[in-house]
Amino acid sequence: MKSTNQITASGFRYWPELDLIRGIACAMMVINHAGYKWLTNQHANSGATGVMVFIGSFAPVVFFFVTGVGIGLRGQRSKKFISVIYKALLLILANELLSWAAGRWVTLDFLGFIGLTMIILECISRTRRPQIFSAVLFLAVLLLRFIVGPVFKHHVNGAARTLIANFLGVKEVAYVGYPICPWLSYPLLGYLLGSFVHRYASKVDDRYKNIAAIALLLGVSMGGCAFVMASLGFPVFRWGLLSIAYFIAGIACLSSCIAVCLIICRVTTLKSFVQLTSLRGVSSLAVVPLHYGIIELTSRGGMRIDNKFATILFASGALVFIAITFWAARRVKATAELIAERINPKVIGALAIVISCIIGLYVVGHPISTAGYWLAIFGQLALCMAFAEKRRGAPATQVAKTSTPNALVTA
């Protein structure tokens, strides 16, 4: 076993576990979306293929959690607030491009929710007691969704009450894919964990086996609890609304991912595997438009897998899909870094925003069209360039066990 307690050439702590979890989340997203496009309803919801698609449905859970971890790892007030707002608005714009292409005006979908989460968590990190604040808010979000919300929904009447019910996560609204309650709980939980690791980095390195064992035990326990609830007839779903059984299953998924990544990243012989399956920064963002584009290309004609070889065909196809998407995402990141070496990143960002806004104007005027869809994807890729930064050094030196965790950073 080898510690991953490393710093980059610029002097910042590097956590490969975070990039590995991002890669896992991206793979899950690809599998889930491909499953519903490539498989018949029967295969997508039952059998081995149904299990793969269901596990893939936890992708947003992992993504939102990792967003919180990343902000927690940075420490308190470590970035200019205007920079956070800028990046959050880029994500919201990217979110709306695809929504406009689908004929919807304003939505709170995947990228938009991440952007909103960044703003909320950055505000929390600037309070005097951010850990206490986020812990209280985490409990409040769960209380509102699973105790207050079910009581309130029986008294819903009128547009205002409907919006409140959606905020509480107990009434579905077409343009809100991720209600604040309880989806905000995942990034809040991630922020708490990131803050803990930021403060006790050396102890995490020394006791990672114990931490992995505890995380795995929690994952098995929560997974077993969710399975029992499902067996007793409790619904397990997340689309529009999120059930208590699914929330518990989500905790099981996160705990298992943490345990696996803590161990794998410290096994020297698995270093190549970690590099192959990890995604950093812009790469993980680029997967979103790239995988949508590939799914659109591969699902044209409406052909779906529906035979006795469905499991093998889908599994092998998904692996190829993931490999292509990851390769293309890394090319986008490399291109963004190359451009950033030659052009001021602020200029790149301004150009990306202008291009995306022009595309947005066209898409709004031509919703639900093939051209609008592909332009929206191109606009999202252009916005990836707005996150461009000059190439960072690879992990270079070993940090002493006594080093302080004040310079933790996510890549």
Image (spheres, helix red, strand yellow):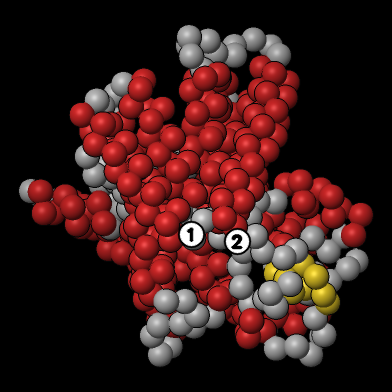
Give the labeled residue for mark 2.
Answer: 390
Seen in the image, is 52 located left or right of residue 360? Answer: right
Is 73 above or below relative to 387?
A: below
Residue furthest left in the image:
158
**Secondary structure under badge 1?**
helix
What mark, if any, has residue 138 been given in the picture? none
Front in this rendered view, residue 177 or 398: 398
- Residue at position x 80%, y 57% from top? 264
What amino acid type should be assigned to the residue bearing mark 1?
Answer: Pro
Distance from label 2 to label 1 (Cα)?
8 Å
Q: Label 1: how many residues lie within 10 Å, few (<14), some (14-19) or many (20+)? A: many
- Residue at position x 68%, y 38% from top? 327
Task: Name the image quarter holding the C terminus.
Answer: bottom right
Q: Position of residue 9 (x, y in %)?
A: 74, 72
Give the labeled residue for mark 1.
Answer: 345
- Mark 1 and mark 2 in contact (Cβ < 8 Å)? yes
Q: Position of residue 124 (x, y in %)?
A: 39, 77
Residue 148 shows in the view: yes
Is 287 above or below relative to 398?
A: above
Residue furthest front in the image:
342
- Residue at position x 70%, y 62% from top? 17
**Secondary structure under badge 2?**
loop
Is 73 above or below relative to 237?
A: below
The mark that comes first in sequence, 2 or 1, is 1
Tell me which corner region of the image, top left, top right, bottom left or bottom right, holds residue 43. top right
Residue 13 shows in the view: no
Front in this rendered view, residue 396 or 268: 396
Task: Name the image quarter holding the N terminus.
Answer: bottom right
Q: How many marks?
A: 2
Seen in the image, is 268 located left or right of residue 323? Answer: right
What amino acid type should be assigned to the residue bearing mark 2?
Answer: Lys
Q: Position of residue 45 (x, y in %)?
A: 53, 27
